Amino acid sequence: MTDLKSMYPAELEEYFLSIGEPKYRAGQVFARLSAGDTDFSVMTALPSALRTRLSENCVIARAEIASRLVSKIDGTIKYLFSFSDGEKIESVLMRYKYGNTVCISTQAGCRMGCSFCASPLNGFRRNLTAGEMLEQVMAVMRDTGEKVTGIVLMGIGEPLDNYDNVLRFLRLVNDPAGLNISHRHISLSTCGLVDKIDALSREKLQITLSVSLHAPCDEIRRRIMPVAKIYPFDSLMAACRRYTSATNRRISYEYALMSGVNDSDRDAHLLGRLLAGQLCHVNLIPVNEVKERGYKKSTRERVNGFAGILESYRINTTVRRRLGGDINASCGQLRAEHTEE
Ligand code: SAH
């Protein structure tokens, strides 16, 4: 079956020419796919014989809502979506003053094995296609009837472990005839796959790169993130410096504060010295306590103390505001609950 929603407009043109249809069918279909149609029967601009033929030979990724939780505090909506093969992933709609942002998953499961994260709990199942990533945004728009202006690739999975599909998604979502979401409003988060960060810097995209650092040195990082055993700390920091010089974009470092693990004054000073003078931003996140993991979040005083030390190195630091706290909105948890059964 041909996966139309993952195809670039030029590939759609080739496809329609190859089945003996005029090239302009590509534009018609791309417009309907981008409007969120997931069924050929509603594409009434196409002749009915063609609609039948397409439904016999092609698929359109569709995400069914398996579960939906709405936060009473801030209106955040967490979705558990199910694809046609039964794989389930999570997406989250976050409402900010400046617009709606959707957090999408890039894989069903994850291979990275970070010790504090819920995503690897039920193993790795498969990569998502570009169409399935687009579909998460579209399914949220269909469900709410609202516009989405920003996307973060911070759901389940490691985006750079699904590099080709993620790049395809980034190009498709930015297409003026498609969802037309600006790369400046897209963030991609990685646990630090050095060779892929280098590949991404060569693409020269205007997206924001977030790097999940979570430690100020190799010793601590190796304990909580197996990926650090493959890509040592220094090699990751060197790749980040290459990324900023190639793209002129500031990197955002994610740092989940875990009580007694990575939140001491010494850790803050190490991090401060490491990042002083870099074009970057540090996002401190009191760790979200996943029951299977056993980490405790740092106290508010510890978080503020840690932030204060970083600021003394003139590092731009924020403490992440937690949305959807009442619905376990952080990714991986809902899927974990649903695969246990
Ligand atoms: N694989 C990518 C993107 C997915 S996770 C990555 O590692 O960056 C999005 C962010 O949530 C990452 O920074 C991740 O480290 C963080 N995260 C995972 N589990 C968490 C938890 N229990 N509490 C706080 N942050 C967590």
Image (cartoon, rainbow, N blue to C red):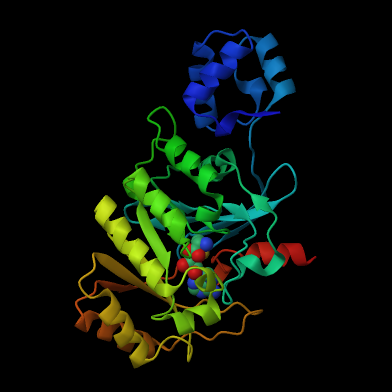
**Residue 255 position within the rendered picture, expressed as x and y whole percent measured from the top left:** 41, 75
Classify residue 310 as left or right of residue 38. Answer: left
**Residue 23 position within the rendered picture, expressed as x and y whole percent measured from the top left:** 51, 11
**Residue 105 position within the rendered picture, expressed as x and y whole percent measured from the top left:** 56, 54
Q: Residue at x 65, y 64 (%)?
A: 334
Residue 229's place in the image compared with 188, above or below, is below
Q: Residue at x 48, y 89 (%)?
A: 259
Classify residue 317 as left or right of residue 34. Answer: left
Residue 166's place in the image compared with 341, above or below, is above
The C terminus appears in which quarter of the rendering?
Answer: bottom right
Which of 284 and 107 lies nearest the eye of the viewer? Answer: 107
Residue 216 sits in quarter: bottom left
The N terminus appears in which quarter of the rendering?
Answer: top right
Residue 194 sits in quarter: bottom left
Q: Residue at x 47, y 84 (%)?
A: 219
Classify residue 308 as left or right of residue 132. Answer: left
Task: Residue 231: tell me if it is visible.
Answer: yes
Picture mark count: 0
Q: Residue at x 48, y 65 (%)?
A: 191
**Residue 91 position within the rendered picture, expressed as x and y whole percent measured from the top left:** 56, 54
Task: Residue 320: tell me if it is visible.
Answer: no
Residue 181 sits in quarter: top left
